[in-house]
Amino acid sequence: MARIAVIGAGMGAMAAAARLAVAGHRVTVYERTATYGGAVGAVEHAGFTFDSGPGLLHLPAVWRDLFLKTGREPLEKCVGLVQVDPASRHLFADGTEAVLPDASRAGIVSALESALGRGAGERWGEFLGRAGDTWDRSRRPLLEEPLWPDWRVLERDPYPAPRQRRLLRARQAATVAEVGAWELADPRLAALFEGCVLGYGLDPRQAPASAALLPYMEQTFGSWYVEGGLRELARAVYERCAARRVEFVFGAEVVSIVEKDGRAAGVELRGGEIAAADHVVAGAADAARLTGRELWAEGDVRPPAAGQPLPGRLTVLLALRGARPASAVHRTVVHSPDTGAEAAAVFGGGPTARPTVTVLRPDDPRTRPDEGHEAVTVSATVAGHGGGVDWTDEALRERCAGALVDAAARALGERPAALRERLVWHKVLTPAETGGIPAPALAGPGGRHLHPANTTRLPGLLLAGGHAHPGGGLAHAGMSGALVAGLIVEGADFRGSQ
């Protein structure tokens, strides 16, 4: 039985902790705040409850696997998991609207054909077919296996872009934006793809075409809502850890990772206490800061150099008077009229005039005080805090939040003034409070969208979370935890999750 010290109680860290405890190890989680869940938080006030982080779950199989492998009670016994159908409603800049069913390629193709005109659905269906090939080619090395030492085999983009005649020569789309312009050939379909990619913290002008697996993942495996909000999933994972005798120490700030005989040997807490361990699990940023040494060899995938902060999310929580109509759609996306300009602002460190806005309107009595009210969450991807945008500027916060409320009014079919009259209260969350969005790993030229491996040059120190392989996102966090646990339990023989 090994002693495992886990730094932080985020979702990836807890996923690793539960699996390691079941394998017979003694696991202690040190969390500097007073609670668990990391970015999966909640805001509760006056009978309303909102997710302060992600609001929908994709690839629930990742978390089903965790609960299957760590106990008798499956995920659905621990949380209420509801498939969202229709999956999304899309409002485009030209006034057209499309409502897409959940996890039905034929239904999605039909809906787009009907809403956007002849050929639109067919082109999207062909795109999803190529995206499916991308998923099949990259799923194992990107999500289910530790990052290969010879990671450069992932420099080849697995997206099978058709060759097209461009500027007197045959070319293939290499970026998300080129796929939208050349293959989808409709600004609304391009906005559908680019808006999805931007929501994952990726620049559609630069992200490789392999990002096609992101809308494929959502539209193939579905969108799921956790009753009471995604914070309930964090609670269930925490309780599963506690049931497997994982010890949590809250209010415990780790100030350094202890080394002995050339390997990680524990953690030092603020106040001077040393907690010995045989393995330490940390996030990539924490590990680099807490060791003060080089953790990556020449040729390894490394964290991005310090500079422009990661994009973040601007969120407005709306506590509203008035009942939610029975016909309301759970998720509505109001698309920007110019995704390229939006991306230029987000990744150039400036405010966005007309962003792509997602409006979540759950039909869940646990989120509101009574049937005469509703809780609506409005969000957009924005430039990160610092590097050009100061999200502590109250005037900037309220001005940008106002643009989101105006978009929400369109989604709800109301005038902005009428929506504001319904407000009981509202709260604005910015990247200054919630941090940046680590993107999921993608194969592509230069390995620019890969993340550091879960192992490091310091034996005994492993990396979990959104800034390590396989990158950001709630599903990816669960995969990260599974990979770290496998590497500790099976060592060099570990070949990936099954």
Image (cartoon, rainbow, N blue to C red):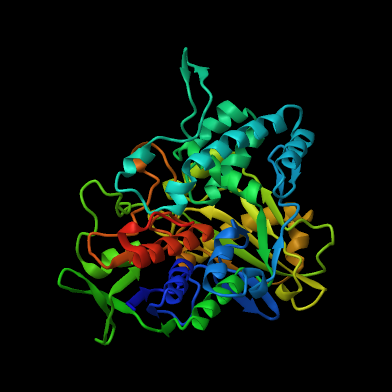
In the picture shown, does residue 469 fall above or below 220? Answer: below
Number of marks present in the image shown: 0
Q: Nearer the viewer, residue 207 or 314?
A: 207
Where residue 77 appears, as percent x and y from the top left, is 67, 73
Tell me what residue is drawn at x 39 percent, y 58 percent.
467
The quadrant where residue 294 appears: bottom left
Tell me what residue is drawn at x 54 percent, y 77 percent.
240
Residue 208 located left or right of residue 379: left
In the picture shown, does residue 359 fall above or below 258? Answer: above
Q: Can residue 354 be seen in the rendering of this structure?
A: no
Q: Can residue 420 be seen in the rendering of this structure?
A: yes
Residue 101 located left or right of residue 223: right
The quadrant where residue 24 appears: bottom left
Residue 324 located left or right of residue 213: right
Where residue 51 appears, as percent x and y from the top left, is 61, 68
Residue found at the far right of this picture: 326
Where residue 495 appears, as percent x and y from the top left, is 39, 54
Tell me what residue is drawn at x 35 percent, y 69 percent.
281
In the picture shown, does residue 376 fall above or below 237? Answer: above
In the picture shown, does residue 309 fall above or below 42? Answer: above
Q: Nearer the viewer, residue 271 or 395?
A: 271
Residue found at the far left of this picture: 261
Q: Which image quarter holds the N terminus?
A: bottom left
Where residue 60 appears, as percent x and y from the top left, is 60, 60
